[in-house]
Image: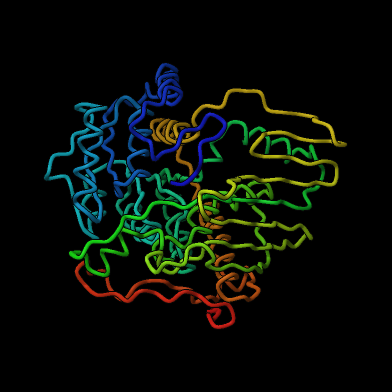
Amino acid sequence: MTVPSHSGSSDRRSFLKTSAVGALAGAAILRSGVFAAETSTLKIGLVGCGGRGSGAAVDALQADANTQLYAMGDAFADHITDKVGRLQKRFGKRVDVPPERQFAGFDCYKHVIDACDVVLLASPPHFRPQHLAYAVEKGKHVFYEKPVATDVKGVRSVLQTAELAKKKGLCFASGFCYRYDYGKRETIKRLHDGAIGQIQTIHATYNAGPIWHRGTNPKWSDMEYQVRNWYYFTWLSGDHIVEQHCHNHDKAAWVFGGMMPIAASGTGGRHWRTDPKYGNIFDHHAVVYEYANGAKLFSFCRQFSPKTDIEVSDYIQGTAGSCSMMDHTIIIGGKLAWKYEGAIPNMYQVEHNELFANIRAGKPFNDGQSAAYSSLMSIMGRIATYTGKKVEWDWLLKESKDDLTPPHYDMNGKIDAPAIAMPGVTKLV
């Protein structure tokens, strides 16, 4: 996960650091008796054992004292063994994942899901649709990381799976974590109550520095290299506009009350990230989203040198005032009219606290449609920057043949390096 620390939130990549706020939040819920009606041990399965998945496992174990990490799966066995020992050191016997419940390979998710009651899905985004479909087919509660897919085909699949989860009464919780931030909840409630009038524009920015690269190894096949360095390949990550900037798109969708854009156009490319090791993703995108009521979302993201400035922000302009969402402030007539002053517990912990509380209470909730649509907004922006064409929402959702599925899932097989998109050459499909 690539969300920077802010407003008291902690970075999930540092999952082994004790989060006092998160632990206290979990303890408070346990003391409140939310789980009193159901005390059976919930077996948790983790699919995707990177920093993001490990952080989710920590949050799940802290959210409910009667949970047990019972099975783990990842494309690579070394990812599992590395995390098992660390988690056991922190949680002791509550991490009960012997070798026979450690599953590696592309089909690992099936074995983990079959073994557990609640599943945490944190593999690279390309795999999310098939993992979600299998989990819901098997009747399991799910926490799944954002984005839900990397192409339109995947989004359609997740929308269908979300509907099935509703019919089965399953909790279907997404990792769009800002929706669990108390400050943002209160801020957006006020916007929905008309605090700044009708929303006219949103200026959303996710300007960040470079991220990790796993290096190379002569023993790795083409497929293994791409999956280990999944962030740099569009079929696996969706590009950083999808994997990272989707948070801003989700916040915009939240502000607009679920209203989706009708069209998007934009530009982007590779200016700083030129080495072939960086696969085929861009390093900057600028997209304008248009809405049926005349509102617009101006969306910018980049991953450049660490010497460049970092900014993650959402500025909202209404007919009667403005709002800075990351600061939780509302400005009227050029003066501060309101600022959130309440508690801001760790939003990552809150989402798991609420997930397990609802499981215990038998009150399923479902983020499927909103998570799928926010992911599609990001995919829409990427398609616009890759092709140089205006992309219409209705066409994208109903007619587009956008499908990034690779020719095979053979870890030892050859797979060509995907081409870098070229606006005017790359086709709108």
- Counting the numbered discs, the total is 0
Q: Which residue is drawn at the image coordinates 26% and 30% (left, top)?
A: 41
Task: Work out whether 401 lies above or below 121.
Answer: below
Task: Work out whether 185 lies above or below 264.
Answer: above
**Where is residue 278 shown, x and y percent of the image?**
41, 64
Q: Nearer the viewer, residue 120 or 348?
A: 348
**Where is residue 188 shown, x and y percent of the image?**
68, 39
**Where is residue 300 shown, x and y percent of the image?**
63, 57
Residue 79 is left or right of residue 244, and the answer is left
Q: Is residue 243 visible?
A: yes
Residue 154 is left or right of residue 340, and the answer is left
Q: Nearer the viewer, residue 91 or 39?
A: 91
Residue 409 is left or right of residue 230, and the answer is left
Residue 387 is left or right of residue 42, and the answer is right
Task: Work out whether 324 lies above or below 104.
Answer: above
In this picture the colour scheme is rainbow
Q: Which residue is drawn at the image coordinates 41% and 16% (left, top)?
A: 31
Q: Which residue is drawn at the image coordinates 52% and 27% (left, top)?
A: 345
The residue furthest front is: 307
**Where is residue 259 shown, x and y percent of the image?**
67, 55
